[in-house]
Structure formats: structure tokens, C-alpha cells
Amino acid sequence: MQLTIGSSRLSNTDGVISVRGNQQILFEWGPFEPKLLLTMDLYNISGSHIARLRRNQWTFNDRDRFVFTADAGGVSLVDTRSSEVILEARVVSGESVVVTRGVFNSSAGRQIEITKEDWNVVTDSQAVTSPVIESTSPPFDDHEVVVIREAVISSQDTVVCPRCGGPLTRARVPGSTEHETWLVSCIMCRRNAVVRGNS
């Protein structure tokens, strides 16, 4: 699956989006038809687990707070209290999905906002740009992240995955103020890492 979140494009990803290290969203294709399936855990501002959608079906949905819709064009999740779109994703092609917008809480109660241009944590009504969303399968270990970072900041050429030797793609995370930041993805083993370069 090719997954686009904000201005970042992840190729050959497993569809998992982890927020602050916790898997919160999963996109996958239906086993018998080319239908987009969404699995997502929903939390309130206190971090309480208030709903879970699994493969387009509710496992639980506290007081029917959320409404989910799906069709051939994608999926949408709406908060009935605020009428706010929690998550919207569109199918662009048979293998490509674009998350067009979203506003939801992490398991720690932090608000995450996704727009067409960016994704970030919202704190005290101000957007704080940081690479809070990662797709990992499973994640690189600390030593591998160090190796990747050194390769990324020292080379403009192809960087290889320290785990499997496959080529790594790099997407610059927009809005980084102190350091250049990249989302690095292996197209072979589908692991991803966020690395920061020099200022």
C-alpha cells in the first residue's frame, strides 16, 4: 500500500500508523474485494478509550458517539457531538490511499491534526510541528536509527536499510524549525523511522 499523510508519502507500507509509539490506525485492503478497511482506536482528552473500529465494524462505540461510513472511494469517521471529521481517507488507485484530513486524540489525550499539507500535535490551541506519526513494521532499533541518521545527513545518494539492505526512501517532514527532519522508509521490509539531521 502507498499511504500519503500530509505531504509525506510512504511506499510499500503495511498501513499501520503509530502515534507516539502506540499503534492507533490500520488501513488494509479487503480480502475478497478491493475495499479499504479501517481499524482505529479512539480516545477522549483524558486518554480514556471510548471507541474501537475494527475492519469497518464497531467493536464498541461509547453512546454511539461516532458515525463511520465507507464506500468504494474511501472511509470517513465523524464525531456526532461536534460534527467534526475524525478521519477521512480517499482511495486514489488500487494501491494508493490519501489521508485527507483528521483530528483525533492519542492514547495520552494529545490532539493530533492531519491536513493536506502537514500532521502535528496541537497543544494549547497552537500547532507544534513534530514527527508524531510513524508507520513501523516492526520499528528499527536504536542502533539502526543512528546508522540511518548518519547515512542520511552525510549522503545525497541512495541510503540502504541496515536491517535488510533494501533501498530507503526519504520524505522531508515540513515545518521542522530546529533541525531538518525526514521520514525514512524501507521499500523492502516496510520499516520506517523519523530521523533528525543537523540544524
Image (tube, rainbow, N blue to C red):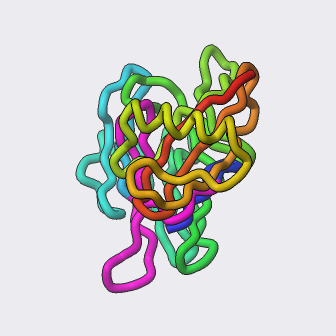
Q: Is residue 89 above or below residue 199?
A: below
Magenta region includes residue 15: yes
Q: Is residue 17 left or right of residue 176?
A: left
Q: Is residue 123 left or right of residue 23?
A: right
Residue 63 sits in which quadrant? Answer: top left
Q: Residue at x 70, y 53 (%)?
A: 157
* Camera-side residue of 45 and 168: 168
Q: Is residue 119 above or below residue 101?
A: above
Q: Residue at x 31, y 79 (%)?
A: 31
Q: Residue 167: x, y in percent?
A: 55, 59
Question: The C terminus lies in which quarter of the figure?
Answer: top right
* Camera-side residue of 172 and 82: 172
Magenta-colored span: 9-38
Residue 125 sits in which quadrant? Answer: top right
Q: Residue at x 69, y 20 (%)?
A: 126
Magenta region includes residue 142: no
Q: Residue 159: x, y in percent?
A: 59, 51
Q: Is residue 172 above or below residue 45?
A: below
Q: Is residue 8 above or below residue 29?
A: above
Furthest-bottom residue in this view: 32
Q: Residue at x 49, y 24 (%)?
A: 110
Q: Residue 120: x, y in percent?
A: 62, 32
Q: Residue 161: x, y in percent?
A: 48, 52
